[in-house]
Amino acid sequence: MNGPVPAISVFTSFDGAPLRWATWPADGPADGPADGPADGRTDRGRPLILLPGRSEFIEKYQEVAGDLTAAGWTVHALDWRGQGLSHRPTANPQALWVDDFATHVRDLLAWMDAVVGDPSTVGPVPVLAHSMGGCLAILALAEAPQRFSHAVMTAPMLAILPHRPNRLIRWLARRKNAQGQGHRYAWGQRDFHRMDRLFLLNTLTSDRRRFAVQTDRFAADSAYRVGGATWGWLDAAYRAMADATAALPRLTRPVTILVGGGDRLVDNRPARAAARFDHITVLRFPKGRHELLMERDEIRQKVMADILDLLAGTAHPPLSSSH
């Protein structure tokens, strides 16, 4: 996939786990052309946090990073523990597991402290997050609002599998995890398989080339591969989704949510319902699937244009009077 090659580093998290992260510097000089607000400020070179979704990795976002850096943002992205080339805690490295999504949030905030700096000095920064990354961004916004100026999210994971018996799956996940089977794959889940490369079977995007970015990398390099969900991951995910949905009304920063009309992986009903809150805006793309940032050009160009406008227009929002 076209896009700038990032500078890769490793961060040691709060418990000693090595987490891989990357920076894409803004195009052009840091002080940039004076194309910012009327007072002469420019946002060129300002940091932006990019949070991938479940099973993804930094390099998948090179094209997105290219759009953001061309608009003057310095982009920082993180491989979540358990995926990408970050620490994998399970005997089977493909079996995605986490004890609690609070661990991911601790990773995120510790990493931001190290990479972005103290918010009292550098100010709050925006976050662009996808799917599981959106769920985690909401939890982080609730826990540390001073770190963030605003959030833009595509298909945030507030509910999953809209056509599946979620109450039963959640009960099973909790039960299996309590029985010590948290590291085992949930029923029907497995390691990455060559059948996963078949574009016609995918529900993520209608763009063949962008779909292949992840599956081709998985096929070529086993270190990147992530399989299905474990019982432990599902148990943690259901708890986190409930917490994130409950947190939405209490957030003190502006949030914009972009959803696809054809998303079959994430249930977007909780996100659409959140549009009733003054600080939350929901934009719907009827032809888009789950991965709006990886969609075909007809859809993606509008998605990215809206995202860049949102980031440019609310780079310095007023802090909420309630916090």
Image (tube, rainbow, N blue to C red):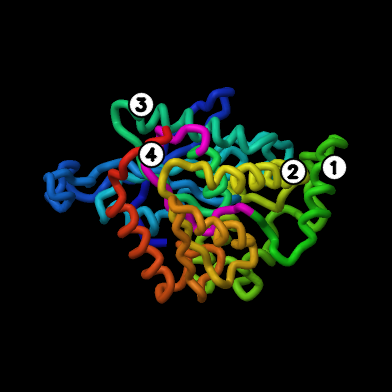
Is 257 left or right of 23, judged from the image as shown? right
- Of labels 3 and 1, the one closer to you: 3
Q: Which residue is labeled 4 in the image?
A: 320
Q: Do the residues labelled 3 and 2 touch (CB within 8 Å)?
A: no
- At x 34%, y 56%, the residue is 310
The percent coordinates of residue 114 (x first, y second) are: 40, 27
The quarter of the rendered structure image containing the N terminus is: bottom left
Q: Which residue is labeled 1 in the image?
A: 176
The quarter of the rendered structure image containing the C terminus is: top left
Pointer 1 local density, CA inside 10 Å: few below 14, some 14–19, many at least 20: some
Q: Give the range drawn in magenta.
A: 142-158
- For marks 3 and 2 on the same chain, the one whose residue lies earlier in the sequence: 3
Q: How far apart are marks 4 and 2 (CA)?
A: 33 Å
Q: Distance between the residues labelled 3 and 4?
A: 19 Å
Q: Do the residues labelled 1 and 2 touch (CB within 8 Å)?
A: yes
Residue 15 placement: quadrant? top right
- At label 1, the amino acid type is Lys
Q: Distance between the residues labelled 3 and 2?
A: 33 Å
Q: Which residue is labeled 3 in the image?
A: 118
Residue 40 placement: quadrant? top left
- At label 3, the amino acid type is Asp
- Of labels 4 and 2, the one closer to you: 4
Q: Which SS class for mark 3?
A: loop
